[in-house]
Amino acid sequence: ELLLEVKDLSAVIAESKQPILKGVNLTVREGEVHVVMGKNGSGKSTFVKVLVGHPDYEITGGSVTYKGQDLLEMDPEERAVAGLFMSFQSPVEIPGVSNIDFLNMAYNSRRRKLGQPELGPIEFYGYIAPKLELVNMKVDLLNRNVNEGFSGGEKKRNEILQLAVLGADLAMLDEIDSGLDVDALRDVAKAVNGLLTSKNSVLMITHYLRLLEFITPNYIHIMENGRIVKTGDISIAKVLEKEGYKAISGT
Ligand code: ADP
Ligand code: MG
Ligand code: MG
């Protein structure tokens, strides 16, 4: 079943009108894992930010259909309620708000919008405890302020925890593996694998082929200058590893 269909999507930076996305095409079906790779500055982060409705960008052409709806007509909140999730390349710190309160609020806000009962702090703790194990996260990180003083690995685990708490039909993970040691990488990959079902899909941006030792994608896409210039299977990654981006460049 079709989940996301991106056709000829173009976008500019809202402030400067500088074109960044120049006709992106991508189709994601339920249960698929997609990886987007490409050089720094090719537009990978912009692509996923545009999909969640980030205000820094303006759509100038093309269409995005998500679960049969026009995604570009939905506001960012509606997109989130509809199961679109994005983890940030640089997760933000929120001073003065404890991690567990933040997650509980985010969870309850989602439940409200779905017309489901909210969870109080004790019930919520029961809900989140097994998920901590999934991401192998220390329980004391729940009582610290959101991401404040977290190590790189802890921030990434926290992003995955957020995903596990909120759930998603399409999880877009931007460089979730950058700055991780091999143990943290394995934990994050295991957690992502644990969240995958035949229904939900993942779109991962990565620079590192080592992530692909732990998560097997259905498709690898290469982004270059605001377009997906090549799509293939894991063999693309192998060419990339040996010969670099110029071997698979679209130009
Ligand atoms: P990638 O994630 O592939 O490294 P990005 O999507 O972050 O690339 O950025 C693509 C290009 O757009 C870069 O040249 C970047 O500097 C520029 N860019 C993206 N977002 C903004 C922004 N909000 N303001 C100014 N420049 C931006
Ligand atoms: Mg980058
Ligand atoms: Mg990026």
Image: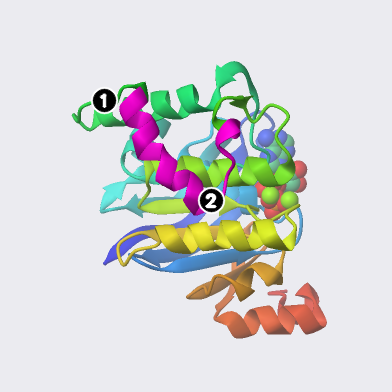
Instruction: Name the residue type under label 2.
Output: Val
Give the residue at x 46% y 59%. Answer: 202
Farthest residue, direction top: 96
Q: Which residue is mark 1?
A: 118
**Residue 85 on image: x %, y %:** 45, 44
* Gap in angstroms between the C-alphas marked 2 and 1: 24 Å
Q: Residue placed at 47% from the left, 75% from the top?
A: 218
Q: Residues within 10 Å of mark 1 (few under 14, many from 20)?
A: some
Q: From this viewpoint, is residue 11 visible?
A: no
Question: How far across and down, in percent of the image, does residue 132 sit?
Answer: 49, 44
Check whether the beta carbons of the residues at disc 2 and disc 1 lie within 8 A of each other.
Answer: no
Mark 2 Cβ inside 8 Å of ligand 3 = no
Q: Nearer the viewer, residue 206 or 189?
A: 189
Q: Position of residue 241 (x, y in %)?
A: 76, 79
Q: Which image quarter holds the C terminus?
A: bottom right
Q: Is residue 135 magenta?
A: yes
Q: Which residues are magenta?
A: 122-141
Query: Where does residue 170 sit, x and y in percent of width and height?
Result: 40, 53
Closer to the camera in the image, 96 or 17: 96
